Image (cartoon, helix red, strand yellow):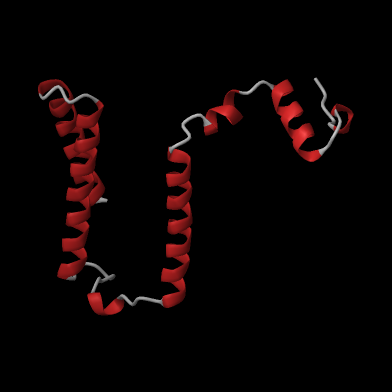
């Protein structure tokens, strides 16, 4: 709880300074949040490392497991590849978000060989 308090208070103090005094705008708010979170995390690391808690953190307790690492890497690699592929197509998401319903019906029916009567649409 104390780590969260430290992080949040630091964020509350640094946010207006970086936004208004340094004129950093939203980037200043982001920097203040990151600094607050870092200080909160450092507090917790020191707290657990000193042994003040029932819980403890020691490097010997951490182990690298092949199945977990390969699963995380697979998801990360696939997500990153999709991001790189779609980066060159800025309107890809906009087609699905802003396309009129009639256009979507026409595209799907042409792609899948369906008629408009195959769609069950109620208005």
The quarter of the displayed image where residue 42 is located: bottom left
In this view of the protein, which residue sits in the foreground, 60 or 108? 108
Tell me where residue 70 appears, x and y as whole percent.
44, 70
In this image, 7 relative to 88: left or right?
left
In this view of the protein, which residue sits in the foreground, 44 or 52? 44
Residue name at image x 48 percent, y 59 percent: 75
Q: Is residue 4 above or below residue 114?
A: below
Q: Is residue 2 visible?
A: no
In this image, 49 relative to 74: left or right?
left
Tell me where residue 110 appears, x and y as whole percent.
77, 33
In this view of the protein, which residue sits in the foreground, 26 or 93? 93
The quarter of the displayed image where residue 111 is located: top right
Tell me where residue 123 appears, x and y as whole percent.
80, 19
The residue positioned farthest toward the bottom in the image shown: 60
Q: Is residue 80 above or below residue 88?
A: below
Q: Is residue 33 visible?
A: yes
Residue name at image x 44 percent, y 58 percent: 77
Q: Is residue 52 above or below residue 21?
A: below
Residue name at image x 25 percent, y 71 percent: 56
């Amino acid at each position: 709880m104390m780590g969260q308090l430290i992080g949040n208070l630091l964020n509350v103090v640094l946010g207006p300074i970086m936004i208004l005094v340094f004129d950093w705008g939203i980037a200043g708010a982001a920097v203040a949040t990151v600094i607050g979170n870092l200080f909160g995390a450092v507090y917790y690391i020191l707290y657990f490392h000193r042994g003040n808690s029932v819980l403890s953190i020691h490097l010997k307790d951490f182990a690298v497991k092949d199945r977990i690492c390969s699963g995380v890497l697979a998801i990360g690699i696939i997500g990153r590849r999709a991001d790189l592929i779609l980066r060159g197509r800025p309107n890809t998401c906009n087609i699905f978000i802003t396309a009129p319903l009639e256009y979507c019906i026409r595209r799907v029916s042409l792609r899948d060989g369906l008629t408009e009567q195959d769609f069950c649409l109620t208005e």
